Image (cartoon, grey):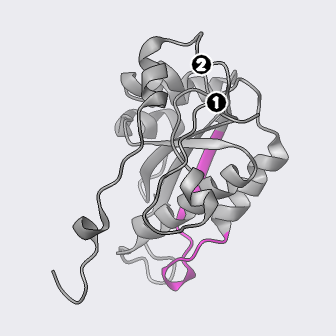
Amino acid sequence: MKNTIDKKAKTNYGIMPLIAERWSPVLFSDKQIEEEKLMQVFEAARWAPSSRNEQPWRFIYAHNGTPEFNKMIEALMEGNQDWAKDVPVLVIVLSEKFSSFNGEPMFHYMYDTGAASMQMQLQALELGIYSHTMGGFYAEKTKDLFKIPENLEIVSFVAFGYPTDKINNRPSHLQERDKSPRDRKPLSDIVFKGAF
């Protein structure tokens, strides 16, 4: 099923179609994601690059309708609860802060976990599954609810689901979020040749 909202990026330079098609909806189909496809998504994350091959990423996932999913909704800030309660799968993205080689704090753990998360989301899109990353969560509540050890940092929550063509029966403020245009800063604001 294709999303009826065309959000393909109108880029200045040619990029991979998968990247141009990636966006973060708040409205998803209620179709459940097959476990095998979820494992493909996590497998893509597993093969991300990392400093010293530390692979600091960890993931907790839950399907809608389970007690674990309900706890994840409870850990989200209210603005995200509003729409995330209806998604098929939620994932908590975590990162190991200390090196497995010497126990010292790692400088690149968040960078590496971000790379794994992006690979995970692009693999999902290749399978027709959209995603939405959330930074709006209660860290202490998440730690308590999921008994997350101190050596792990909560990076984000990610919602996964198939697109929907039935948005007209959803709350109008959520429809507006999905219909709003995509925008990015110009390259001249973020890329500098040689120096700032």
Query: Which amino acid type corresponds to the residue marked 2 in the rendered image?
Result: Ile
> Quick check: is 107 in the magenta stretch?
no
Helix, strand or loop under label 2: loop
Quick check: 108 above or below 34? Answer: below
Instruction: Where is residue 110? Give x, y as percent.
Output: 41, 64
Q: Is there any visible trace of residue 97 in the rendered image? A: no
Mark 2 packing: few (<14 Cα in 10 Å), some, or many (20+)? many
Q: Which residue is mark 1?
A: 4
Image quarter of residue 189: bottom left
The answer to whether residue 59 is magenta is: yes
Left or right of 35 on screen, residue 53: left
**Which circle's residue, 2 or 1, is located before the other in the chain?**
1
Q: Which residue is mark 2?
A: 167
The percent position of residue 81, horizontal first and vertical second, equals: 46, 23
Q: In the displayed image of the protein, which residue is found farthest to the left?
A: 196
Report the quarter where the N terminus lies: top right
Left/right of residue 1 with respect to residue 61 in the rendered view: right
The residue located at (55%, 56%) in the rendering is 20
The span shown in magenta is 47-61
As displayed, is residue 25 above or below residue 70?
A: below
Q: Residue at x 51, y 85 (%)?
A: 52
Tell me whether circle 2 and circle 1 mark residues in contact (CB < 8 Å): yes
Q: Quadrant of residue 46?
A: bottom right
Q: Is residue 10 left or right of residue 121?
A: left
